[in-house]
Amino acid sequence: MAIRGTMAWVDSLRPQVPTLSAAELAGRLKSGDALTVIDIRELQERIDKGAIPNSHHVPRGMLEFWADPQMNYHRDYFVESGRYVVYCAGGGRSVLAALALMDMGYENVWHLDGGFGAWEKAGQPVEDAAATSRWQRKP
């Protein structure tokens, strides 16, 4: 059996996940829409590139554990009635993450089309995550 290409697989899953563009997300945040923005990139990506302002960093490998209210790892910003937008660097990992949250029972989940790269390209504000992190940028 041949190994399935990851991006082809992710692309086949995209129709199952509600999507917001960078402009749509920015508009919703500006209007005061109560969205919780989840950054699932690796910590070093967040430190090196910055983040969408006020987003929560949830490493992809910990998402299900932090989102599960029965786990000791649970984070209080994950609530059943919450509204979540998940993003990664380019919009692939966020499809998988959004599907995971939906499979867990979260009903209001979107992924950011094009990820952080699309957010940056659209000229949206970027928070300097390194400024408030105890972790350092590596040269």
Image (cartoon, rainbow, N blue to C red):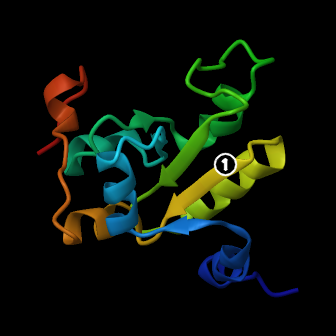
Drawn side of residue 47 relative to residue 10, left or right: left
Location of residue 127 in the rendering, given as x and y in whole percent from the top left corner: 19, 41
Q: Residue at coordinates 22% horizontally, 70% vertically from top-left?
A: 122
For the N terminus, the quadrant is bottom right
For this rendering, which residue is in front, 137 or 78? 78
Residue type, mark 1 in image: Asn
Few, some or many C-alpha atoms within 10 Å of disc 1 (few <14, some 14-19, many ≥20)?
Answer: some
- For label 1, the SS is strand
In this rendering, does residue 45 appear at all?
no
Q: Residue at coordinates 35% horizontally, 47% vertically from top-left?
A: 29
Drawn side of residue 91 relative to residue 103, left or right: left
For the C terminus, the quadrant is top left
- Residue 27 versus residue 55 in the image, above or below: below
In this rendering, does residue 36 appear at all?
yes
For this rendering, which residue is in front, 137 or 85? 85
Residue sitting farthest toward the front: 31
For this rendering, which residue is in front, 1 or 50? 50
Location of residue 27 in the rendering, given as x and y in whole percent from the top left corner: 33, 58
Q: To which residue does mark 1 refer?
A: 108
Residue sitting farthest toward the top: 72
Drawn side of residue 112 relative to residue 117, left or right: right
Location of residue 78 in the rendering, given as x and y in whole percent from the top left corner: 62, 28
Drawn side of residue 65 relative to residue 34, left or right: right
Location of residue 99 in the rendering, given as x and y in whole percent from the top left corner: 72, 57
- Residue 127 versus residue 20 in the image, above or below: above
What is the total number of numbered labels drawn onto the structure image? 1
